[in-house]
Amino acid sequence: MSKVLGLDISSTTVGWAIIDADKSGYTLVEHGHIRPPNSTKGSLTFRASKYYDDLLVFLKDKNPDFVAIEAYANKFPRGKSTARTIIVLSFFNELSSLGCLKTLGFEPNKYAVTTIRASLSRLFNSKIVSKDDTFEIIKNNVKGFSVKKNRVGKISKQSYDEADAVAVALAFYFKEIKEKNIS
């Protein structure tokens, strides 16, 4: 069994999920999120430094065999993101990769959003074309995934980030363990 950590990285909430997996299947072990300080708490440098410190502790504690993240450069359709958004997300994404390298001794596997959705589509025999489709598939098909509600009773933003982290971990499972028999 391999312990796989999936990360859905942003500068506001980093969703994470851990699965145990081998060629015969996977089990969702746990999922949650890390909240970097928001922009009202300080500069980008301050926020990134605090996140990096928290990430290193988290990685040491969880000690996964593999880490998978979404490849950020592939997810910005023209006109949908500002240069600032792309820069900040790229910064947090690379900071996460650096944390993996420094703490665990390896860089994470990176998957384009299209690869993640295609892997889930094949894994669950269902066409997945959007972030909402991804959430529904994870919510309805992954045993152990729990949806959290916010103060007004709606699905919390963090639940979507956590579902995306599960999706990233499952993409690793599908691409690397199921297809390539790495374990």
Image (spheres, helix red, strand yellow):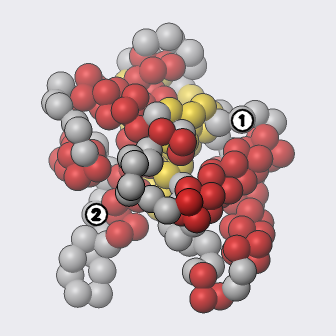
State the SS at label 1. loop
Question: As shown in the figure, which amino acid type bears the numbered disc 1?
Answer: Glu
Q: Which residue is mark 1?
A: 107
Q: Is residue 143 above or below residue 109?
A: below
The quadrant of the rendering that contains the N terminus is top right
Point out residue 53 in the picture as x, y percentages from the top left corner. 77, 66
In the picture of the structure, the residue carrying the numbered disc 2 is 147
Position of residue 182 measured from the top left corner of the image (x, y, whole percent): 56, 15
Q: Is residue 115 above or below residue 23?
A: below
Q: Is residue 166 visible?
A: no
* Extreme residue in the top direction: 180
Give the amino acid at mark 2: Val
Helix, strand or loop status at disc 2: loop
Q: Is 30 positioned to the left or the right of 34 in the image?
A: left
In which quadrant of the rendered view does residue 88 lie? bottom right
Q: Residue at x 43, y 12 (%)?
A: 179
Q: In the visual, does 13 lie left or right of 25?
A: right
Q: Residues within 10 Å of mark 2 (few under 14, many from 20)?
A: some
Identity of the residue drawn at 62% across and 58% down: 87
Of labels 2 and 1, earlier in sequence is 1
Q: Nearer the viewer, residue 2 or 135?
A: 135
Horizontal side of residue 161 vs 128, given as left or right: right
User: Residue 63 location in percent, x, y?
Assistant: 69, 45
